[in-house]
């Protein structure tokens, strides 16, 4: 189930994508440091949301193509285990991506992103991304237009945590303390909990054949 | 028979609502005539929310019971909900232009409505991408449930930023009695219309199913 770790070329290609997005943002917004500072939270989360869509799209493709899903289904393990396994796989994938991407952001945009605040925001938001994304990815892979279905479901559903992450990152970049961030972090945690519980209850219905 | 009665009831209520909106109710002092759009805007929002709540309930029941009827119910309700959300967004825009000076602002309620609208557009896209009826019903139910759960969180997240939309005037008793009465009649009229359209749509879809089954039989 953690076969993504083996799929190293997957991480590499998503990383190249992330780098390209940063470069394109630089073309779009110029190098004015004042401006970069104000659009940086948006840049960061647009990049991660799209990188998330890209990597989550791949989450079930391997199973689909190799017919592994049927194999997993007949295994004497519960459907929840499959969900948790896929979710953790995607979580590790995304976290590796972010651990590499954030220093690149820091260096290229000259921003103070290597802080505990940014790390916490990123970690919590990524959990929300992968819990939502894993559920929808399992659906999307069974549809005719799978590359399209995931983003149209995923992006509106995660919009609240993107809003919170952008606002919290903005505050963190301008040096706000934990107290100022807490409201945003609480909403992200609430989203994570609600979606995880719902996904747990629903996932079995998605993958049954 | 019930549909006949509903048709008559909602027709009468609609005429009464139109009379109240255009003749009976006093013109708003601050906003002028344009404020009358309120009596259509709010009921449309109410119907849209009611419709999506029914989608949420029907989706849960479908997943639990696996009766095709509930999938048909959910999709019919979602169709009407989407139409009313669209009408609400459009009527809101028409109202916003003279009052706020813009067609659209990224205000919490507007943005939440827009996200809700996008989620239910996605609901129908997912349905259209799936040929297998059972899978289509299951996946749509998942979107219906998650989409509905998501809406309060979206609202909460966006509300933390500044709001421009008048919020709880209705509940704080900020409306004069005549306005309140007009609004209530409009809400009841629109709800009756919603029930009627939903029942008609369900009837159509059941007939459609029946027809498909008969076709299968004939083909054999």
Image: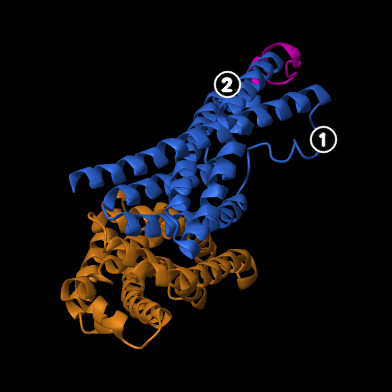
Chain colours: A orange, B blue
Numbered badge on residue B98: 2
Report the mark closest to the observer, 1 or 2: 1
Please say whether residue B17 is visible from this viewpoint.
yes
- What residue range appears in magenta? B22-38
Residue A114 location, x and y as percent?
A: 43, 75
Pick the front one: A68 or A50 = A68
- Callout 1: chain: B
Numbered badge on residue B173: 1
Instruction: Tell me the residue at 20%/80% (across/down).
Output: A8
Please say whether residue A33 is visible from this viewpoint.
no
N-terminal of the pair, mark 1 or mark 2, is 2
Residue A58 location, x and y as percent?
A: 25, 69
Do marks 1 and 2 share a chain?
Answer: yes
Discs 1, 2 touching: Cβ within 8 Å: no
Q: Is residue B83 magenta?
A: no
- In the rendered image, the residue lying farthest to the bottom is A76
Q: Quadrant of the N terminus of chain A?
A: bottom left
Q: Quadrant of the C terminus of chain A?
A: bottom left
Q: Is residue B23 magenta?
A: yes
């Amino acid at each position: 189930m953690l076969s993504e770790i083996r799929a190293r070329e997957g991480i590499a290609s998503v990383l190249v994508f992330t780098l390209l997005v940063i470069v394109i943002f630089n073309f779009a917004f110029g190098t004015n440091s004042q401006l970069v500072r104000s659009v940086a939270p948006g840049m960061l989360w647009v990049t991660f949301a799209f990188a998330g869509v890209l990597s989550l799209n791949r989450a079930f493709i391997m199973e689909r193509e190799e017919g592994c899903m049927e194999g997993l289904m007949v295994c004497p393990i519960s459907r929840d285990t499959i969900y948790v396994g896929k979710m953790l796989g995607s979580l590790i994938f995304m976290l590796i991506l972010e651990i590499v991407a954030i220093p690149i952001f820091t260096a290229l945009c000259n921003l103070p992103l290597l802080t505990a605040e940014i790390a916490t925001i990123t970690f919590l938001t990524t959990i929300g991304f992968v819990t939502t994304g894993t559920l929808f990815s399992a659906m999307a892979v069974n549809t005719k237009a799978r590359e399209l279905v995931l983003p149209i479901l995923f992006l509106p559903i995660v919009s609240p945590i993107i809003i919170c992450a952008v606002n919290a990152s903005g505050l963190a970049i301008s040096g706000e303390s934990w107290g100022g961030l807490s409201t945003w972090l609480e909403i992200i945690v609430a989203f994570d909990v609600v979606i995880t519980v719902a996904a747990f209850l629903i996932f079995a219905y998605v993958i049954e054949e | 028979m019930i549909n006949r009665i509903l048709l008559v009831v909602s027709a009468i209520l609609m005429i009464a609502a139109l009379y109240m909106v255009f003749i009976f109710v006093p013109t708003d002092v601050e906003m002028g005539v344009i404020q009358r759009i309120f009596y259509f805007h709010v009921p449309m929002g109410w119907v849209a929310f009611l419709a999506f709540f029914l989608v949420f309930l029907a989706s849960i029941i479908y997943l639990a019971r696996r009766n095709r009827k509930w999938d048909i119910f959910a999709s019919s309700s979602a169709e009407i909900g989407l139409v009313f959300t669209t009408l609400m967004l459009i009527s809101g825009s028409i109202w916003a232009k003279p009052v706020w000076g813009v067609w659209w602002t990224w205000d919490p309620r507007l943005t939440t409505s827009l996200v809700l609208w996008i989620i239910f557009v996605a609901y129908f896209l997912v349905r259209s991408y799936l040929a297998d009826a059972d899978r289509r019903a299951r996946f749509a139910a998942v979107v219906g449930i998650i989409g509905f759960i998501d809406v309060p969180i979206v609202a909460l997240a966006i509300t933390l930023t500044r709001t421009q939309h008048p919020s709880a005037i209705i509940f704080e008793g900020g409306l004069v009695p005549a306005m309140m009465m007009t609004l209530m009649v409009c809400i009841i009229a629109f709800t009756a219309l919603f029930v009627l359209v939903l029942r008609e749509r369900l009837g159509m879809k059941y007939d459609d199913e029946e027809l498909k089954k008969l076709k299968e039989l004939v083909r054999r």
